[in-house]
Amino acid sequence: MIYDSAESWLEAPEKRVMLFGMSGLGKTHVASMLRRAGGWFHYSVDYRIGTRYMGELIADEFKLHAMRVPLLRELLLTDSVRIRSNITFDNLAPLSMYLGKPGDPARGGLAFPDYMTRQNQHRAAEIAAMLDCGHFIDRARAIYGYRDFVCDTSGSVCEVVDPDDPDDPVLAATAALMLPVWIRGTEAHTAELVRRFDRAPKPMYYQPDFLSRAWSDYADTHPGPVCPDAFIRWTYARALAHRQPRYEAMARRGVTVEADEITRVASPADFAALIARAITRKHRKDA
């Protein structure tokens, strides 16, 4: 770890952390708080994916649908309108829309090969966005004077790395720059995330082998055209279980904090104290 003790963390002139864990447990909430309080640069991996790496793909999807409307078609062909997404740290709907859901086109689904193409695009984009952290650490310092840096990862980061490989290029590069911090949820948190997802299922990125097995297993037990929402609801809880050991393996390179601890963080000082305690717990556990 780049901070070998609670004291070295607290006294460090530059504090750099990489928050990871299930979506919905507080990564973006804490990162936004640190940004608003001042002194911290907030690097959102999802935002970088949806703007730098998949922004053109998303805009082209909008244009494809707009070309089916005669008025918009004429305006597009004469360069009279501009169509682009308006992704923010808190609104990733354009990226989710582009990823889509596999299943019956009559119910808004994508053919499975097309869905896999978009999944692969997201994988490449997420890896590239993670590897951009070093550039943004330097950029934040050189342009804005920020010395503290928080990387707000995507919930799917554990799917685009091999957490058991000590030489994984993404994890090796990021852990050399930042302290990995796993926000760990309880079974109660997981159940609440599943309930929330069931109310409003959203597109997600899945590890390719896991997704292929899920698609095959679902087809075996649900004959006929696949309902996109039904499939991703069925898959979501399985995906959370699949990700848990991968997050845990990633956390061996850093520290673990509990989701309930994160909810009590109200200031940068609270956050610094929490990470110091997590480093101390890590050393006691490893001793």
Image: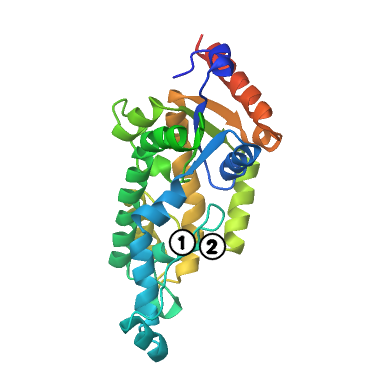
Which colour scheme appears in the figure? rainbow
Residue 284 place in picture, x, y as percent? 56, 12
Q: Is residue 171 visible in the rendered structure shown here?
A: yes
**Mark before the other along the chain sequence, 1 or 2:** 1
| Residue 201: image tag | 2
User: In front: 60, or 223?
Assistant: 60
Quadrant hosting residue 77? bottom left
Amino acid type of the residue tagged 2 in the rendering: Pro
- Residue at the spot x=31%, y=29% of the render? 165
Residue 106 sits above or below residue 124 on the image: below
Residue 130 sits above or below residue 166 on the image: below
Residue 234 place in picture, x, y as percent? 49, 59
- In the image, is 184 to the left or to the right of 241? right
| Residue 36: image tag | none
Question: Which residue appears farthest toward the bottom when viewing the image?
Answer: 70
Residue 238 place in picture, x, y as percent? 47, 50
Name the element at disc 2: loop
Residue 1 sits above or below residue 195 on the image: above
- Residue at the spot x=48%, y=38% of the render? 244
Quadrant hosting residue 31? top right
- Residue at the spot x=60%, y=19% of the render? 276
Residue that mark 1 sits on: 96
Q: Residues within 10 Å of mark 1 (few under 14, many from 20)?
A: some
Question: Which residue appears farthest toward the top when viewing the image?
Answer: 287
Q: Are marks 1 and 2 in contact (CB under 8 Å)?
A: no
